[in-house]
Amino acid sequence: MSHDPEIHNFLLQHLQAIMENDIETYHATTSPDLTLYEWWVTPQRIDGLPFHDFMMAENAKRGAVFGEETDPAEKTTTRLDLANLHIQRYGDTAIASYTMLLSTGLPMGVKVVAHNETRVMVQQKGTWQVVHVHKSPAWPAPHTQP
C-alpha cells in the first residue's frame, strides 16, 4: 500500500518535531537505538539520539529551524514537503521513502534543497518509533569514487 494514513500522520509528526526543535516529541517518536546515514554529514553510520539532540538544542538557541542556514534575525519561513511519498507496511514495521524538499523564503527568493530519504518505523506496545534513517543525494552521484 502506498498510502497509509496512520503512518503518514506519524511521519509528519516526527518530522515536524525535528523542524521545530521539539526534543520531547522527537524522543517520543524515535527509538533510543536509532541508526542513521546522513551523507552530507559523514560517510559513517551515526548511532543514537545525542547527535540530533545537540543539533536541535543549538538551533533552538539561535531561533532557527532544521535546514535553515540563514541568519535567524532574517525572519524566514521554511516549508517541508515529501515528494513521491511511498509507504510500505508489514504488520508492526513500516518503511517510508520519499524525496524531502525543504523550501526557505529568503529576501532574494525561495531556495529549495532536496535529498532522498528512507525512514524505517516499528510499532512496539502500541507506539510507533523511527528506528533507522537513510539519506542520499537527490542529484546524480557518480557510481565510482572520484
Image (tube, grey):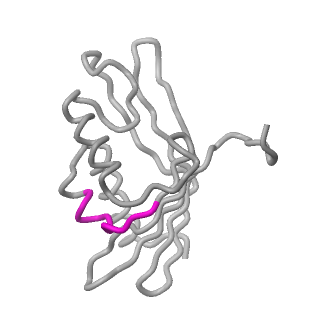
Relative to residue 80, is residue 91 depicted above or below? below
Relative to residue 27, is residue 127 depicted above or below? below
Relative to residue 125, is residue 3 depicted above or below? above
Q: Is residue 33 magenta?
A: yes
Q: Position of residue 51 (x, y in %)?
A: 35, 49
Q: Is residue 64 left or right of residue 38?
A: left
Query: In the image, what residue occupies the spot 36% across and 33% down?
Result: 78
Task: Count all numbered tags in the image, as a single digit.
Answer: 0
Q: Which stretch is magenta?
A: 26-35
Asked where in the image residue 74 lies, by quadrant, the reply is top left
Is 44 in front, or is 93?
A: 44
Is 29 in front, or is 36?
A: 36
Classify the position of the N terminus by image quarter: bottom right
Query: In the image, what residue occupies the spot 55% across and 52% down?
Result: 44
Query: In the image, what residue occupies the spot 33% across and 70% down?
Result: 129
Is 118 in front, or is 33?
A: 33
Q: Is residue 124 left or right of residue 41?
A: left
Query: In the image, what residue occupies the spot 23% across and 27% down?
Result: 62
Classify the position of the C terminus by image quarter: top right
Q: Is residue 25 magenta?
A: no
Is 33 in front, or is 17?
A: 33
**Is most of the magenta stretch helix, strand or loop?**
strand
Q: Position of residue 118 (x, y in %)?
A: 53, 60
Q: Position of residue 54 (x, y in %)?
A: 28, 43
What residue occupies the far top of the structure in this picture?
Answer: 108
